[in-house]
Amino acid sequence: MKKMKRAFTLIELLVVTAISVIILTIIAVPMIQGFSITRAAAANTEVQRIAGEVVGKMQKDIGEAAYVRSNAGAAGSLGIVLPDDTNTSSVFFVPRSKIDLFPPAKGDLTINSQPGEFVNPDTGRVDPTASGPMGDPNFPAAPGMVMVRWFIGLQDPELAYSNPYSTVETSTGQPWLVDVLNKDNLYVLYRAEVSPWRFVDADSNPATPLVKQANSDFFAVDGDGNPILDDPYFFTRLSSETPAQTARRAKWKSKATIETSFTRHDMIGIETNPQNNRMILFNGRPRISSLVRFQPERVNSEAAAGQTSLIAGSESSNSEKVGPSQLMTEHGAWDARSLRIAPSQYQAGGGWGAGSAGAVQPPYNGGLYLQTVQDPTFNMLLLGSDGTTLFAVDEYQRLKTNGSAFPFTLSTAPSALIGPWDVNFVPFQVNRKSGRVQTYFDIRDVGSASGSTPGFNHRVPTSPAMLAANTPGIHVGPAIPFNADTSSGDWASFDWDDGDNLLNVGINRRYNKLWHNFASLAPGLDRSQYVKRYVDLRLMRQWGDIPSPLDKRPTSGGGFGATRGSIRPGSERVFGPDQRPGPNYGRNVMYQRTTQRPVGPNQYLINYVDQPEPDWAGLGFAGVNYDKADHDPQDFVSAVLQARYRAGYVEFNSSPGEPIPHQYDPTPASPNSGDEVATGNIYVTYDFQFTEPNDTFFVDYDSADSIEVVLTVLTYPQSTNVTTPQSVTVRGSATVKNNLR
């Protein structure tokens, strides 16, 4: 009997096959997925490495540059073309996506072989790839001819944006971005070295120097012949452009190097809803952002540190009331700023001693504060919290730079030449480069030109009478001994209580009458201590009959309307007739400051700030007003006694029988000539400020002293299982070492 061989049945084979398929599926699918994840992770690691290297290169460029241009506003914005919500090409602006910097100058320009050609000092031959002179950096470091520009742009700027990996949908659920190229054309990060200028041989004469011209191969040229560095479309293909634009873009493409990968890596981000991957719209347009940002370091609510106004040799009485003349922030190079001022509390009325006008005002306790905002023309305006325009800071600085007459009063509220101001008025100017808030101004910036540009002498404090007579300065008056003065015919027609007439008769005659009448005016006071030859700068008017910033009276009373005015210590310059016998007697000289009484010849004593006042009631004067905003020219205490305790009081030699010389030149020069040597008058210039020690300045700003580089790269891995782009972000910061911004 033949023995039969045993075999698997069909059912067994089917079962084994099914089990094998299941086992293979269990093993193979995770393996394939693992390979995909491994590729994605490898791509992510590679992008992190590349991004780190790129950020390091940017930091090196910025840190070593001799000049880093600000990239705020148009200077750092680029116009890029992308499909909008209807898949129609549209231009989008992305800020802070471009930065220009100039490395230090290198080599020697004079060794050029031909205009536009630069010799490699190592080989002695012309290097056609060089953008500027080559060799070691020159010292001291100065910007060279070559500019380095970092920016984003399409990998091929002549073609449309194309991203076949994108899964973004429009707001209606339609696929965003139809792939028309069958390949990717993404935004990448470029670095280019070009020269904005070039030297050409204009007359083909080797003996004449080369002529500097804008490099029109790379830049459009403005009407003044300068290269336009802030063109947001320099690398953008527009629907309508000139052949010159196309040619310049090709030049940039030939010079630029792609620093990120040119495929599967994108430098543009589109904000989407993570639940359905549909784009988010803002005003009907997709929200687009650049994935590289060159941004200054942001500082919020930094309390600017006050710098003392006092320097060696300018010590003064009641110096604790002297406010800072400038405040410094930790960083400089402000790109944008917002400043808030919490002013110290104004104390109306008051009393004597520590409670008088000479007291330091208490810190801010709520109420009206001040802040800066930007108007449509980007002038920084100082505003009260109630919205009242007080002072145009940028307008003042523009007028000052342009040499305009009286920029301070021209920069006040548009509704009036002076004011409307209040007790919290604290104007300032700024130095963005150093990060300094400067709180003082030149008194010669206050006035009204009245249709003409006045000479120097007309821009110093003077009296209404002197202005009317077109004669500058503060009138000294005739040097008449008081005994002879009392017998003059007009002795009874002037008095200390007539402000304009008192200034008209001059310092000497006022002294005479005060000395003669003081015993009846103030019987309880020592005449030698209170009768002085002095000037009250509060009452000295500026050209155009504008009140002094030291005049704290309201504008309705003829004053300046601000109650904080004081003099920056050490800023004053006092000129007057030489009081010492000799060949220069009567000629104008600069007086020297003293802090001690009695004041000698050619000396002066000055109050920079209000001083604590005595108890006038205890000295026999009832009902005295201690408010610094009060001044009554008809009241002896207010006009004479209190004047010596107020900011702006300047005292001269007050010895009897030693009047200030009146005049030495009977034929003075023209009033507008700038000649300070004329009729023996007193000339005073000074800086004024409105700060108190307890004022607080808070500054929000972007500081270009330190540039932060934020680089994010969207990566589309070569994997069918990873459908969303991977995001890699690397940050770095670089300290800007130059001071040429």
Image (cartoon, helix red, strand yellow):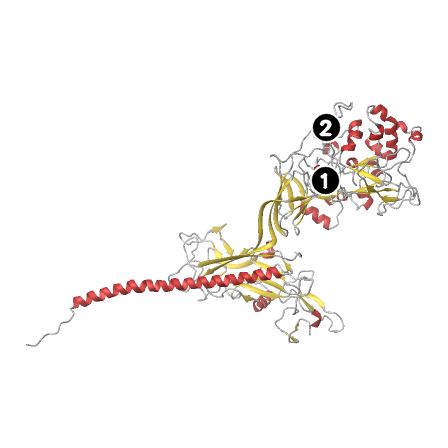
Q: Quadrant of residue 685?
A: top right
Depth check: give the residue in front, 614 or 396.
614
Q: Is residue 289 visible?
A: yes
| SS class, disc 2 | loop
Amino acid, disc 1:
Leu
In the picture, the quarter occupied by the N terminus is bottom left
Q: Residues within 10 Å of mark 2 (few under 14, many from 20)?
A: some
Mark 2 or 1, closer to the camera: 2
Residue located 70% across and 49% down the image: 398
Depth check: give the residue in front, 199 or 614.
614
Amino acid, disc 2:
Trp
Judged from this view, the residue extending furthest toward the left is 1
| SS class, disc 1 | loop
Q: Is residue 231 visible?
A: no
Depth check: give the residue in front, 412 or 366.
366
CA gap, disc 2 and disc 1? 34 Å
Q: Residue 340, percent across and down? A: 62, 42
Q: Residue 422, percent across and down? A: 67, 35
In the picture, the quarter occupied by the C terminus is bottom right
Where does label 2 land, which residue?
A: 352
Q: Which mark is residue 426?
A: none
Q: In the rendered view, does 299 fall on the left or right side of 595? A: left
Where does label 1 land, which residue?
A: 417
> Earlier along the polypeptide chain: callout 2 or callout 1?
2
Q: Quadrant of residue 193?
A: bottom right
Q: In the rendered view, does 485 fall on the left or right side of 371? A: right
Q: Residues within 10 Å of mark 1 (few under 14, many from 20)?
A: some
Depth check: give the residue in front, 572 or 473.
572
